[in-house]
Image (cartoon, grey):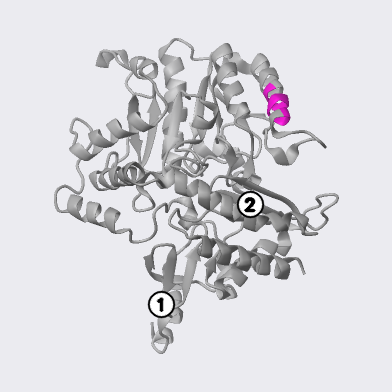
Amino acid sequence: MNDTKNLSGNAALAARDLRHVWHPCTQMHDHETIPMVPIVRGEGVWLFDADGNRYIDGVSSWWVNLFGHANPRIADALADQARTLEHVIFAGLTHEPALRLAEELVRVTPEGLNRVFYGDNGSSAIEVALKMSFHYWLNQGHGEKTRFIALTGSYHGETLGALSVSDVALYRKTYAPLLLEPILAPSPDTWDAEPGESPTEIAARRLEDMRAVLERNAGEVCAVIVEPLVQCAGGMRMYHPDYLAGLRKLCDEFDVHFIADEIAVGFGRTGTMFACEQADVRPDFMCLSKGLTAGTLALSAVLTTDAVYEAFYDEYASGKAFLHSHSYTGNPLACRVALETLAIFADEPVIENNRRLAAHLASRLEPLRDHPHVADVRQTGMIAAVELVRDKATRTPFPFEERRGMRVYLHGLTRECLLRPLGNVVYFMPPYVVTESEIDHLVDVAIEGIERAVA
């Protein structure tokens, strides 16, 4: 450590970090020129580094933080639970936070999702849903059902099963030899609309494509898995709720499960508590994480129906039990924090406030539609995205090697903003406690960064 003894603040912490830590979704060589930013505390929408600089968390710390950093209600609930029970094996034992959380999740999710299986994180939830769907059909005597249908541009996580039903080459390509092969159906996202085609029309067209896929493959398909309304890691691609309503009917018609990955879009992010509500549909499996604990601890949940549960309910010797497990399944600390998250939704007009904030964000982004290097400005609730291109008329993208989005990120750090674009897509997904003036600052800084990025 002798080479760092004269360093202080950000420089000292960054040097210690780079000695040992390997960060996610990062080419570590970048940090020879791109600063590592050590965060020492958070308060509301703000993050503070060791040099006293502050940053608006414009991406909710990877889309998890709903009610601000160091939220007093959530912190108090966590501390109270930590003095009572921090963890216990969840096989054969139970505890109040887990069973109360299950009751609350059943209450707030679409009617009929009466069974709750806990996991550790979003990818774990997807693994559970995929395995549970396959195993359901196996228990029903349909072992020929072994495949899954996913949408082009989809992303469901980075464990091998979750990655298998994802279609983002950046994450999938390297590990392709290890993965299951999904059946891909064209996404209904509005980016791919024909000239003059409305969101409802593209939804209808893509439902016909899905029908054709099911007609060819339903006999070997366990489930269709989708991210309702917004394909987040695939570039914040968005589509109309009609697609979800039609997909529910197709899954019923062809006797396959409907898995809704609400990990990123659930808990008020799209303008309703859950995105599926906007189509008035109930999936067979709903996967939840991220906002479930408002960004405090890792926890996920898969909700499913009594019919699915009953397909596993039998004498032990039948071999029908679902033996998937994680050491921290049903962790009391995480469950207690999730209960406080749901209590905030119950006690405060969160959804109504989000709609007001979303409208303000939309009005501030509207002028970017005329920018010569902006091909699209799109928004669903508290998720908004700006697509940067080299040529607006042809929508020709900037070469990925130029890393135009990185320029926006670096500019943001100089202007008190954490913006972390997805390639050339600059997006906004702030915590729900953000103010209109803080939204103004985020957008102003993003516009400055865009001007520098496309120059």
Answer whether residue 25 is magenta in the image.
Answer: no
Q: Position of residue 279 (x, y in %)?
A: 55, 28
Do we see residue 425 in this rendering?
no
Dot 1 crowding, Cα within 10 Å, few <14, some 14–19, many 20+: some
Q: Which quadrant of the figure contains the N terminus?
A: bottom left
Instruction: Count the numbered circles shown.
Output: 2
Which residue sits at x=28%, y=31%?
103
Furthest toward the top, the residue is 141
Q: Which quadrant of the figure contains the C terminus?
A: bottom right
Q: Mark 2 points at which residue?
A: 385
Q: Where is residue 57 in the image (x, y as percent from the top left)?
A: 48, 62
Q: Mark 1 points at which residue?
A: 50
Q: In this view, does 341 lie to the left or right of 65?
A: left
Sooner in the amino-acid sequence: mark 1 or mark 2? 1
Q: In this view, does 327 lie to the left or right of 371?
A: left
Write down the region rendered in magenta. Answer: 201-207
- Say which of marks 1 and 2 sits in front: 2
Dot 2 crowding, Cα within 10 Å, few <14, some 14–19, many 20+: many
SS assignment at label 1: loop
What amino acid is found at the position of numbered circle 2 in the picture? Answer: Ala
Furthest toward the right, the residue is 393
Answer whether residue 203 is magenta in the image.
Answer: yes
What amino acid is found at the position of numbered circle 1 in the picture? Answer: Ala
SS assignment at label 2: strand
Which residue sits at x=54%, y=13%?
255
Q: Where is residue 213 in the image (x, y as percent from the top left)?
A: 67, 21
Which of the numbered marks, if any, corresponds to residue 98? none
Do we see residue 259 in this rendering?
yes
Pick the front one: 260 or 339:
339
> Secondary structure of the magenta portion, mostly?
helix
